[in-house]
Every structure is written in C-alpha cells, then in structure tokens.
Image (spheres, helix red, strand yellow):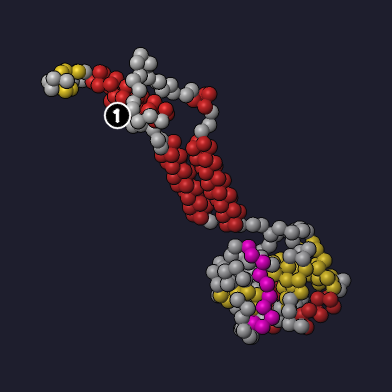
Amino acid sequence: MALIVIGVVVLLALAAVVLLGTARRRAGTGRLSRDTRRADASTPPAGVMPVPTSEGEASESTGADVDAEARDRADESRRAIGTGSSVPVPSGDRAPVRYEPVDEDELGVTRRQFFNRGILTGLSLAVAGFGGAALAFLWPSGAGGTSGKINVGTVDLIQEDLDKKQPYYNATAQVYIQPYPKQDVKKAAKIYPSTITAGMAQGYVALYQKCPHLGCRVPWCQTSQWFECPCHGSKYNRVGEKRGGPAPRGMDRFPLAVSGGSIVVDKTAGAIQGPPIGTDTTGQGQEGAPCV
C-alpha cells in the first residue's frame, strides 16, 4: 500500500514539472532571444557602403544615412498607396513615426497569457482531481457502518432465505448471514479464533460485505453458490473462504450469537480478518456457472 501511495505522489510531482516547463516555454513564445536583444542594442560598426551617384561614382555613406533613406522611400510608398497615385510623394521634412512600446501595466493580461493560464489551470485541476480520486480508491477503508451489537433478524426470518440457498443480508450491519456445517467446526477451530467458531457452533457465520482486496461489495452468485466480486474477480465459497482472484485472504467476518430467537452480530471490536489463502474447511466447490 505504501508503494502505491509513493507511486501516485511521484506521478503528481512529474506532472507538476511538465506543467511548469510547458508554462515557461509558452511564456517565452514570441520574445526575442537574449543574444538578439544584445545585438540590436549594440552600436553598429562604422562601415562604409558605396552608393551610386548621378555621375556613376560611389560615395561613402554610413549605415544611419542608408536607414534614413530607406524610411523615406517607405513613407513615400505608403503615401502613394493612400492617395491612389502610383507616384511616390516626397516626405519633405516630415519625420517618420516611431514605435513606442506599450506599458505592460496599462496593457494588462494579453489574450495569449489568458489562454495559457487557463490551459495550465485546467490541467492542474485535472491532475489534482485524478490524484485525489486515485488515493481515495486505493486507500483501505475501515469496517464502517453501525458499530456495537446489532440484531440482524429472527432465526425464522433468516432461515427463509437460507432455505432458498441464498444468504440473508442485513444492510444496517452490512453483513451476510450464512449457514455453517456443524460437523466442520472442529476443522475450523484450527484456523479461526474462538470468537468466530462460537457462532459456527450455533450453525451460522456473519460475513462482512466488502471484498478484502479493494473494498468492493461482494454480491452472491446464485448459480455457482459462491460470492463473486465484480471488480477484480475474487471468489469465495459459501462461508467466505477464498477460492480465486487477487484477494489477499478470505472475507472478513464478525462474531455472532443466537439470543432469544434472534441473531445478534457484534461489531464492537470491528471486523476480524478472513482466513488465509488455501483455507477450505467445508470442501464446497463451485455448483454451477459463475457470474463473473
């Protein structure tokens, strides 16, 4: 159980690392690299570029002059397009428009940031929900239900179900009442504690409804005359001794006593663990087709 919990925790940690890495990559999308910004901020070298003149000779011009001429030509082209004329209009003394970066505080959250944060929040909630559900499913549960001594019904009422070859179920105590052959009590005394064999000597056994594997409720299969868990296929004979599947033991049980014509189940001390794998005190085999 500890290994399963550790595995789930490691899985959640890895998911968190992946989410943080994805967020960092998305946050840097569209931004210039550090080397690019450094190169843009640096002073261009004092290079000399030949520019043809009207006489066909090359004159020397700095990179700044070339940039200014390029901006002028671009402005003339834009004005020509705006006026519908194919002839560029000289810019004269009009200065080019300079880009002013928007203040991040004034801009607020961009659309890209909004979607990135929304996706990361959704993924985080999904991973947290899955981890919580996995831990809740794998965490062993206690006996639950009502505690103390519970009168589950009269012997006559219980016997009506037992005569139909099916267990008597009590929802308050969460137990199945099954008959136990009195001739097998001596064999059972070598395995079960005296608190359980005392009820067997009176002809009954009280089985806890939950499978000892992962806590699923184990239904009764009328055709096979066994308890068969639908979750993972564990199977138990009529008195709750394991016959197959991944369960670590037989069905857990509670002490009981026949008092005043009724059967009283004692849940004060909690459930008593079922018998170990391989226990078969009654020798009851599968009597028909399985349900699982």
Dot 1 surroundings within 10 Å: few (below 14), some, or many (20 or more)?
few
Which three-letter amino acid code belongs to the residue tagged 1? Asp
Query: Above or below — where is 18 with respect to 261?
Result: above
| Whether residue 77 is situated above or below residue 259 in the rendered picture | above
* Residue situated in front as seen by the camera: 291 or 272: 291
Q: Horizontal and vertical percent for residue 28?
A: 41, 35
Query: In the image, what residue occupies the spot 66% across and 57% down?
Result: 142
The residue furthest right is 260
Q: Is residue 194 magenta?
A: no
Q: Is residue 193 left or right of residue 65?
A: right
The image quarter containing residue 141 is bottom right
Pinpoint residue 62: horizontal percent, then vertical percent: 21, 18
Q: Which residue range is magenta in the image?
A: 215-224
Work out whether residue 70 or residue 22 is closer to the camera in this orientation and state it: 70
Point out the image quarter for the C terminus.
bottom right
Q: Is residue 220 magenta?
A: yes
- Taking the spot 35% from the left edge, 30% from the top edge, the residue there is 86
Q: Determine the image quadrant of residue 136.
A: bottom right
Residue on which disc 1 sits: 35
Disc 1 element: helix
Q: Residue 259, percent across and down? A: 84, 70
Residue at 62 percent of width and 84 percent of height:
289
Q: Is residue 265 above or below residue 92?
A: below
Name the residue rendered at 43%, 39% in the picture.
26
Residue 255 position by quadrant: bottom right
